[in-house]
Image (cartoon, rainbow, N blue to C red):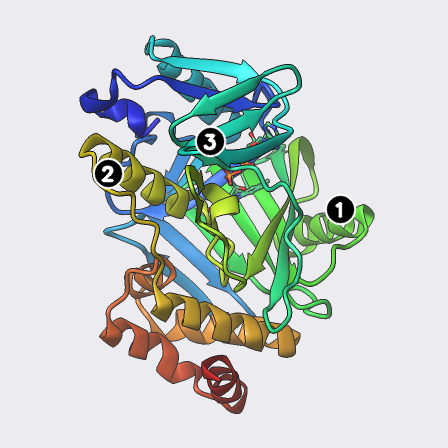
Amino acid sequence: MHMLQYPELKNKSILLVDKTQKNTNDRTWCFWEKETGLFESILHHRWNKLNFHSSSLDKEMSIAPYQYKMIRGIDFYEHCFREIAKHSNVDVIFDDVQSIDNINDKALVQLKDQTITCDLLFNSILFEPIKKEKGKFLLLQHFKGSVIKTSQSAFDPSTATLMDFRTSQQHGATFFYVMPTSATEALVEYTLFTPALLKQEEYDTALQQYIQEQLNITGYKVLHEEFGIIPMTNARFKKRNGSIINIGTAGGQVKASSGYAFKFIQKQSQQIAASLAKEEEIRLSSSKKFHYYDSVFLNVLSNHPQKGAEIFSKIFANNLPETIFRFLDNESTLSDDLKIITPLTSTAFIKAGIQEIL
Ligand SMILES: Cc1cc2nc3c(=O)[nH]c(=O)nc-3n(C[C@H](O)[C@H](O)[C@H](O)COP(=O)(O)OP(=O)(O)OC[C@H]3O[C@@H](n4cnc5c(N)ncnc54)[C@H](O)[C@@H]3O)c2cc1C
């Protein structure tokens, strides 16, 4: 999609290979953004205000100049395929990629019955599951979401709940998102940052309990469900191997301390497309400063799983949303960093900070 924005690239032959047709609503993306994005026309909803709740903090925040935006997976896939169909230089093959490799200065893609050769391969397949590396941290951000329809007006569609920690923290950092798209419809998501998954029925019980006891909703039906696992790790991802460039989750574009990935993936894809258009070398560097912050954060959350609610409460109590968003977007200045870090100073953070330097 980003390559299609550049007239300079219209003579490049692009082949998209995916084993699935992408014709189901398999995920919902939410992210904050200041500017008008590439996918503005397919936003399902947007919010100008966000709530944060924990046992120590209830805060409603206006998030200007940002907006919190939602895109449904199915709308994204349909939109992309519609755009692709307008470009005769793009082909699509639905097939299973068995392996990828380099030969001379080309990349090879092995499908079931054919081998494809290309000058550059952008790979978003994780051929191996992400494993915990020695000396690194790996937490799973796992979540179950239900789109619910209530029989009576129950939500304010102008305000979403970004985090509600008013639930048991026995497994580790655990919270709910509530993203209302009308007075009677919302995506409610139960999310945990822990090393292991729960049993499916535990997600369902937690969701039902929260909807009934915290949101005080009794009459509702579930319109749609989604389940996801996002790896949060400070292990380094191989970004490039010859003509193969890893992108998306496979290219390390998940923010290790938050699990947010959509905007990082878009930003990287936009930079790659711009470099291709200018015939410049593709830069895939990542910031050492933010890798360090992510490592310290994962260290604390892994060694003190019950501290998640307290840490996020301190961050939201002491900072403007725009400072927090810049920090989480890896775009913060040193002055922003100090505002976020200073209230968090504690033995756990100092120890983690020293360990990650060593
Ligand atoms: C349910 C869910 C909700 C999420 N919500 C958010 C959110 O709100 N905000 C956010 O920032 N991030 C979110 N994420 C994280 C992240 O943005 C998404 O996971 C995102 O889709 C990652 O993009 P990707 O390109 O790395 O992987 P994918 O989108 O998973 O794309 C990889 C593609 O590779 C294909 N593939 C895999 N193996 C093969 C093979 N062998 N041969 C051919 N094709 C293959 C798959 O079919 C898939 O289409 C969410 C993730 C999930 C799972």
- Is tag 2's residue or tag 1's residue first in the polypeptide sequence? 1
Badge 3 marks a residue whose secondary structure is strand
Q: Nearer the viewer, residue 104 or 274?
A: 104
- Nearer-N-terminus badge (3/2): 3
**What label does residue 204 carry, if any?**
1
Residue 238 versus residue 305: which sits nearer the camera? 238
Identify the image quadrant of residue 280: top left
10 Å neighbourhood of mark 2: few (<14), some, or many (≥20)?
A: some
Crowd rating for badge 1 (residues with CA inside 10 Å; few <14, some 14–19, many 20+): some
Quarter holding residue 15 = top left
Q: Residue furthest bottom?
A: 347
Which quadrant does ligand 1 occupy?
A: top right
**Amino acid identity at mark 2:** Ser
Residue at which label 2 appears:
275
Mark 3: few/some/many CA within 10 Å (<14, 14-19, 20+): many
Q: Place residue 147 in its image quadrant.
A: top right
Residue 64 in the image: above or below residue 137 = above
Q: Can residue 277 be seen from the camera position used here? A: yes
To which residue does mark 3 refer?
Answer: 107
Quadrant housing the N terminus: top left
Q: Is residue 218 above or below residue 221?
A: below
Spatial distance from mark 2 to mark 1, Cα to Cα?
Answer: 45 Å
> Residues at badges 3 and 2 in contact (C-beta under 8 Å)?
no
Residue 158 seen in render: no
Residue 17, position as x, y percentages in the image: 52, 22
Q: Nearer the viewer, residue 224 or 90?
A: 90
Given the current orientation, which residue lies at the most extreme front position? Answer: 104
